[in-house]
Image (cartoon, rainbow, N blue to C red):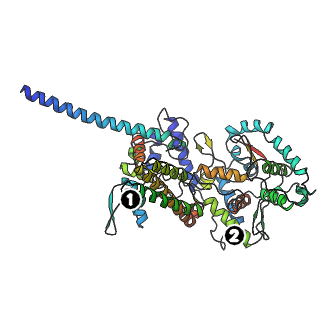
Amino acid sequence: MRKNIRIKHALLGLILAGASTVAVADADLEAKGKALYLNKKKGNCIACHMINDPDAKLAGLQGPPIVAMQARFPDKKQLRAQIWDATVKNPKTIMPPFGRHWILSEDEIDAVVAYIYKF
Amino acid sequence: MKIITSLLAGASLALVASMSSAASTGNTLATVDPEADRLALQAFFQKRFPQVELDDYANGIYALDAASRAQWEEMEEFPPYEFDIEAGEEMFNTPFANGKSYADCFENGGMGIRQNFPYWSDEQDRVVTLELAINQCREANGEKKLKAKKGAIAQISAYMASTSAGNIIDVKIPNDKAKAAYLDGKAQFYSRRGQLNMSCANCHVQGVNIPIRADRTSATLGHVTHFPVFRSKWGELGTLHRRFGGCQNNVRGTPLKAQGKEYSNLEFFMTYMSNGLEVNGPGSRK
Amino acid sequence: MKKYLPLVAALVLSSGSVAAASFEDAFNAERALHGKGHTFTFEGKEYTTDHPEELEAAAEATEANAKALIASAKAKHKEVKAVGYDWTLTKGILKSANKALKAGKFQEAMNLAAQAKYHARMGIRQAQRSAEDWVIMVPGS
């Protein structure tokens, strides 16, 4: 019985450790995405998209604000595709095709998606 | 929340504005109609900003953005380009080594003629801008060409513009070859370029007066009236083609040659769009 | 909150999916959704979402291969400059590729050359696309 409990504890520990590793990885990805969002030479999303993050001051308004992302993009991959090339859905858009023109790498696009999907 | 609501309202207004229609004209030599293009573009802006008088477009973003207008008017009280006009006047009046001067190359001695540039030249088979004509004048008189983007050429151009203040821009398209140059300029204006994949129209038609960070983009109507321009960002005077290069660089496209045919055609199109507005160069901008 | 819900709804509704017609569209649509290293079928044949340039950079990381890829990237760069659609960063990426080559970092050199070559190819493509559809940017069209 005592052995069982110990095993259970060990298992619980493993699960928790696993979950927290995932959480740390997520947080890292989101932090990377945020840095790209703000960096003028990288994503520079802040130039056009307002976002409810205290570090994102004086955002531009050329594009829609980053709000209700999960409602607007129930499939996260569709959000990814929108960043990759916004001209597919709107041929006149001012938004640069971050993927098609390799402005950001694929990993960088994933990071931006991870960051803005929370809003 | 209030902020978000108003921001969303702003974004939806922008959507509506970009959908509002103005008559479109052709993309072939047979169908393109410069005068219809000009009227359609004016109508587009007047519908978008009904409170702005047409003439005021010569004042660029300050016609649309009241917040920055006061600051700009203050700057214009002690114009940063005054020295440049004086320097330009002195150079304009200094004879070349052969005894002739700029006045000999231009109609009316070069005074009050800014509104007729650029013009189509059959002999040269190209659009001739004022800066190109200044350099051609020098070369015809055995002088070296000036650099095309800043310095002396901008100062001489500024002086010539200042003698034309208030004159109405009146660019003409006399024949099909001129029309082809106009069409090329129009195509350039609306073509996406650079890694950021933007056309001039993305910022200066569609996105006019909508903030990019803290900056607002100006309407293309009236763009050419105040050149050459003293830009605070440059801390000096520059020509229109210098500005074209800066814009192209901003969208991560390698700039084309100043006074080359491409930029000259673009200037031809843009100036035709501003026909009817007053010359008010040189001007100052942020 | 309630006030802006209809606007959000409008934004949600405006995001529909688009059917791919050409291989280019199909490739881009798959890459856009999944990034690289994903496989998809187009007209019965299987493809990966890697760019041709990335596949070239996946060759063995040797000095000879790095040199060859840099050379072909430079040739493409020359092509895009000739049509006037060169992008500003490409030159610097090629420089970095050369630097990596000299430092014996062949894989890095190949990756950079692949990106530069892709940029050059996309610039040429941009020239074609602009020629075809610039008129949609005219207000009212």
Residue situated in front as seen by the camera: A92 or B195: B195
Side of C100 where B194 appears, left or right:
right
Q: Under tag 2, what secondary structure?
A: helix
What SS does tag 1 mark? Answer: helix
To which chain does the residue with label 1 belong? Answer: C
Crowd around label 1: few <14 · some 14–19 · many ≥20 (10 Å):
few
How would you rate the neighbour count of disc 2 (Cα within 10 Å): few for under 14, some for 14-19, many for 20 or more?
Answer: some
- Residue in the picture at 70% in, 56% down: B258
**What residue lies at 8% left-to-right and 25% top-to-bottom?**
A2
Chain designation of label 2? B
Apparent side of residue C115 relative to residue C87 in the rendered image (left or right): left
Residue C55, which numbered label?
1
x and y percent of residue C65 in the render? 41, 58
Q: Find the distance from the CA under tag 1 to the CA under tag 2.
A: 43 Å
Q: Is residue B69 above or below residue C78?
A: above
Q: Look at 47% across and 46% down and name the residue there.
A: C7
Q: Residue B180 carries which label?
A: 2
Which one is in front, A90 or C24? C24
Q: Which of C66 and B214 is in front in this view?
A: C66
Instruction: Point out which mark residue B161 bears.
Output: none
Q: Label 1 amino acid?
A: Leu
Say whether residue A85 is visible. no
**Left or right: C44 in relation to A39:** left
